[in-house]
Amino acid sequence: MKRIQIAVPSLGIEEIKAVQGPLESGWLTQGPNVKEFEKSFAKKHNTKHALATSSCTTALHLMLAAAGIGPGDEVIVPSFTWVSTANSVLYCGATPIFVDINLDTFNISLPETLKKVTSRTKAVIVVDLFGLCVDIRTFRETLGSEILIFEDAACAAGASINGDMAGSSSDAAAFSFHPRKSITTGEGGMLTTRNSSLANIAEKMRNHGAEISEEERHNGPAPYLLPEFNLLGFNYRMTDLQGAIGVEQLKKLDLFISERNAQASYYQEQLSDLGFLSLPSKPLNGTHAWQAYVTRIIGPNASQLRNQIMEGMEANGIATRPGTHAIHLLGFYANKYGFKPKDFPNSYIANETSMAIPLHNQLTRDDQDRVISSIRKFNI
């Protein structure tokens, strides 16, 4: 019996041909393909600057570091998100301040955010979880201009809300190209921003703090001289092999999102009558990237039923996952800050009852029908 995976990357002959260029030229680290990928990504997402990185996690760290976030600063983050959102704050020596989410969107709650703002709050990281954009304009109007709004857009390449592309209205954003995302470079990320000063600092920090890139140095008049290093930096560069793949993947992004929207609509049609299943929200005015299709089990013993369904589907060769985790429940954070499970009740509920079902660009209608049939068996 064919196993239906939770996610499968969609790669073709175009990507295979693309990597031949850097392999043949011998320029494998950050170079012309990365630059082309950055330029195309910035144009697609209506932002001025795009800097490719080794991962979304390094893009998150890089944007915080370039903005000067450090010890004594507080950065508000949602509790229900991947752990790297909060980890990036600790990497800077700052303090993550957790807030709860809205259960209907899985995204950060603005009222809960307002409760946690103090004189030490330097930034808020909103997360476009599973590909559904946060309304950043509303956050900006409410929080004012003194607090930076960063966007963890790991899941949201190609998504939009109210005419704003993901990453276009925040102070800076970080995207992921992990294989579970809509487009992939294997590992890899992208930092986007309209702020030229932040971009300039981040570009140097990405390359050990060097004043010029390796490509600029090698193509310049004195390639034998090392650059100046006036900043503490990191090695967060993307390889040109990844950049070449990214260029081709980005060309397919609109098609991929269109296919994912069709799959999500079919799930909505076929599963909407199940009383124990809450289906994910769609934007009223925008495009959902559908990085994942995350449902939630509701009703008595929801957590137990969620686990039973996941076990049953696994036995039938269908992969599922919890949506993500509530960070305040993870051992490191629970021990460090003394959190209790229900300190963030909606995040706790999402942690215990969310269930992602297969959705990706290799998924067939027959695959979806098998997923739907497997879930409907629990409609008792």
Image (cartoon, rainbow, N blue to C red):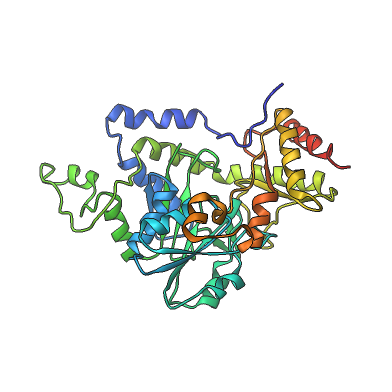
Number of numbered discs overlaid on the protein picture: 0
**Outermost residue to the right:** 380
- Tell me: 46 left or right of 197: right
The location of residue 310, given as percent across then percent down, is: 71, 38
Q: Please report the residue visible at 40 percent of the width from the left and 45 percent of the height from the top.
A: 37
Residue 321 location, quadrant: top right
Q: Please report the residue visible at 20 percent of the width from the left and 55 percent of the height from the top.
A: 211
Q: Nearer the viewer, residue 96 or 37?
A: 96
Q: Can you say whether 282 is above or below 316 in the image?
A: below
**Outermost residue to the top:** 1
Q: Nearer the viewer, residue 319 or 26?
A: 319
Q: Please report the residue visible at 30 percent of the width from the left and 51 percent of the height from the top.
A: 206
Residue 307 location, quadrant: top right
The location of residue 336, given as percent across then percent down, is: 46, 57
The location of residue 31, given as percent across then percent down, is: 30, 41
The location of residue 174, given as percent across then percent down, is: 45, 54
Residue 269 visible within the image: yes
- Tell me: 104 left or right of 244: right
Q: Please report the residue visible at 55 percent of the width from the left and 35 percent of the height from the top.
A: 9
- For the C terminus, give its image quadrant: top right
Q: Nearer the viewer, residue 196 or 315?
A: 315
